[in-house]
Amino acid sequence: MTIIAPSILASDFARLGEEAKAMQAAGADWLHVDVMDGHFVPNITLGPDIVKALRPHVSIPFDVHLMISPADPYLEAFREAGADWISVHPEAGPHLARTLQRIRQLGAKAGVVLNPGTSPAVVEEVIDLVDLVLVMSVNPGFGGQSFMASQLSKIERLRAIIDASGRDIVLEVDGGVTPQTAAQCIAAGATALVAGTAAFKGGPGAYAANIAALKGA
């Protein structure tokens, strides 16, 4: 079954704890946390203190996507705050392998995030240190963007790389995910989907149906 990770970036920020609880009750597998610094990407969202405040509200894993540079100084803070998965961009620091090693040393699962313009070849160089590969199907920094179909071939290539490695690596897609684009991503080889607008639209009463529609893809 495909992992569905609603992005709290699309939630009601005045009710974050309640939103997280509602998503877990609706059947979400993970909670995706988009961390932006206004430097690596043109937006500012949240930090480890908010992750820490959210952690007691739900038991599902926190999938923390660091869109920050440098990322290394903040790894420990996010892990201590409750991050189960921590993903970084290759462009966010000088030593990707060292960063991935540090995430694992902290007891979290380590992920690599590929922007639309980042080559899948990056993953091959660090495959033994990777637990998750996240394909951005939009340029990161804002929610509500349209899915970039050009990334489907990248998902297919990464599926082949992961399968050849023989390792159990999650292949996740984030950006413009709807029930329609979800089906395309799954067909290309994705095993996890981040959904913002598609998960949170309609309010808490619609969350279960939204999750079900994405899983049904």
Image (tube, rainbow, N blue to C red):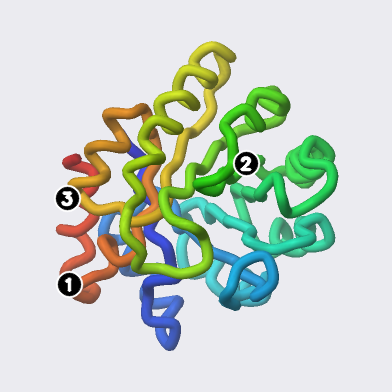
Q: Residues within 10 Å of mark 3 (few under 14, many from 20)?
A: some
Q: Closer to the observer: label 1 or label 3?
A: 3
Task: Give the Cα distance between marks 2 and 3.
Answer: 27 Å
**Of marks 1 and 2, the one in the foreground:** 2
Question: What amino acid is labelled 1 in the image?
Answer: Gly
50 displayed left or right of 153? right
Query: Which residue does the image show at 71% across and 28% down from the upper left?
Result: 126
Residue located beneath label 1 in the image:
205
Residue nearer the viewer, 194 or 21: 194
Q: CA distance from mark 1 to mark 3?
A: 14 Å
Q: Earlier in the sequence, mark 1 or mark 3?
A: 1
Would residue 53 appear left or right of 188 to someone viewing this image?
right
Question: What secondary structure is found at the residue carrying circle 3?
Answer: helix
Determine the residue positioned at 43% across, 55% down.
138
Residue 215 position in % (x across, y down)? 23, 43
User: Badge 1: few (under 14), some or many (20 or more) residues near its Cα, within 10 Å?
Assistant: few
Please give the residue where the numbered disc 2 appears in the rendered image.
112
Helix, strand or loop at mark 2? strand
Hey, which residue is sitting farthest bottom in the picture? 14
Labels 1 & 2 near each other (Cβ < 8 A): no
Above or below, 214 against 17 in this view is: above
